[in-house]
Amino acid sequence: MADEVILLDYWPSMFRMSTAKIALAEKGVAYEYKETEPWVKTSLPIEMNPIHKKIPALIHNGKPIYESLIQLEYIDEVWFDTYPMLPSDPYQKAQARFWGDFIDKKFYDPAWKVWGTAGEEQVTAKKELLEHFKTLETELGDKTYYGGDVFGFVDIALMGFYGWFKAIEKFGEFSIEAEFPKLSRWTMRCLERESVVNSIADSDKIIEYASVLRKKFGAE
Amino acid sequence: MADEVILLDYWPSMFRMSTAKIALAEKGVAYEYKETEPWVKTSLPIEMNPIHKKIPALIHNGKPIYESLIQLEYIDEVWFDTYPMLPSDPYQKAQARFWGDFIDKKFYDPAWKVWGTAGEEQVTAKKELLEHFKTLETELGDKTYYGGDVFGFVDIALMGFYGWFKAIEKFGEFSIEAEFPKLSRWTMRCLERESVVNSIADSDKIIEYASVLRKKFGAE
């Protein structure tokens, strides 16, 4: 039986819409992409995600899988014979999961506040976000990728946010290239991969989208 | 080489101190327990956890592993031949991870506010926490354990919070037994296991501890 893989997503979603796409591309798995605005009640996502009611959902042969990192592990396990993304050693695997979890838990909140709020709230969020970037710059160090020489789990998790980087820099008034040169060169290396370039959202469109929301949120 | 396993913990920690203990007990792995107050700077945890600076840490042959669920996966992978905790099927595994993640992300914040705050803040937190309990009651349904017939990953993740249940019920003024009968019977079943009884903190001591903190936080 051929696999039926559907990705339910909304293009500017900050829930790392690109993570599953990059992973499926690296594995060479074809999928159907369905654009779904989170506030429009289509029968599919409601039926499929009664708890979190959020995208993206990966639907494999009718079964939904939620949460970017859980999707990443699932993809790595199901299509295990092509491009393994997690190391096989349990300790290295725990390390990769630790950094994936760090990105998963720490980025979303300060990141959206940097583009979506103003004043004190934005200043505090920016400080927090820069600390997280600093931590990730330090962890990367002189390695090519987070796991060493091979593009893998942590790289995919972090590049899932890349579409938002330029908007965060613009509204937060800082430069990743100037402040985090290693991280910046790492993004350039990742962007050389077809799997990444074809999966991430357009930074300029995200900036436009964020500008509209900033006004809506009363941040300017 | 014999395994050296150290568990660095602080007994009333809400970061599910019991999760790793229950897992190690089910696997039959002996460990050394080191009590560490989080605010006392001993060289060990500082050296070992430069990022999160939080307990519990599992240290296996000198290598530290952080975060309850990551520890759980690590333990399951290293001691894979005794009592597997995650299902082997990738989709069932993703489901178990989804519920582990739900517990990991959703419980801590409203739970501590229920015992540690008062007024509006406590009311809102209680409402949120009861919704999460309701979700978990529904997901459990008529199953014996979250994964079906066998005590496993999700059970261990949730029972890691059990030591705090009585304090949450007392200060939140509600009864799990009355409002969530299935969940209540499930806790009873889990408490029949030696691995659980020997790993969870004493509920009465937790209530005393929470009472002291409530006063300190100005909640009464």
Image: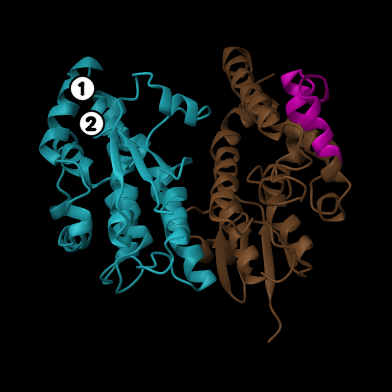
Chain colours: A brown, B cyan
Is B48 placed above or below A25 here?
A: above
Q: Secondary structure at mark 2?
A: helix
Corner quadrant of residue A76: bottom right
- Residues at marks 1 and 2 on the same chain: yes
- The alpha-carbon separation of the residues under discs 1 and 2 comes to 7 Å
Going by the numbered disc 1, the residue's amino acid type is Arg
Closest to the observer, A199 or B206: B206
Q: Which tag, 1 or 2, sits closer to the chain's start? A: 2
Query: At 61% from the left edge and 59% from the top edge, which residue is drawn?
Result: A88
Q: Residue furthest bottom?
A: A1
Residue B201: x and y in percent read 19, 41
Q: Which residue is mark 2?
A: B115
Residue A220: x and y in percent read 70, 18
Query: At 70% from the left edge and 71% from the top edge, which residue is drawn?
Result: A81
Please give the chain letter of the residue carrying mark 2.
Answer: B
Closest to the observer, B141 or B100: B100
Residue B162: x and y in percent read 23, 47
Q: Which residue is mark 1?
A: B214
For the question of whether residue B151 can be seen, the reply is yes
The residues colored magenta run: A167-188
Corner quadrant of residue B86: bottom left
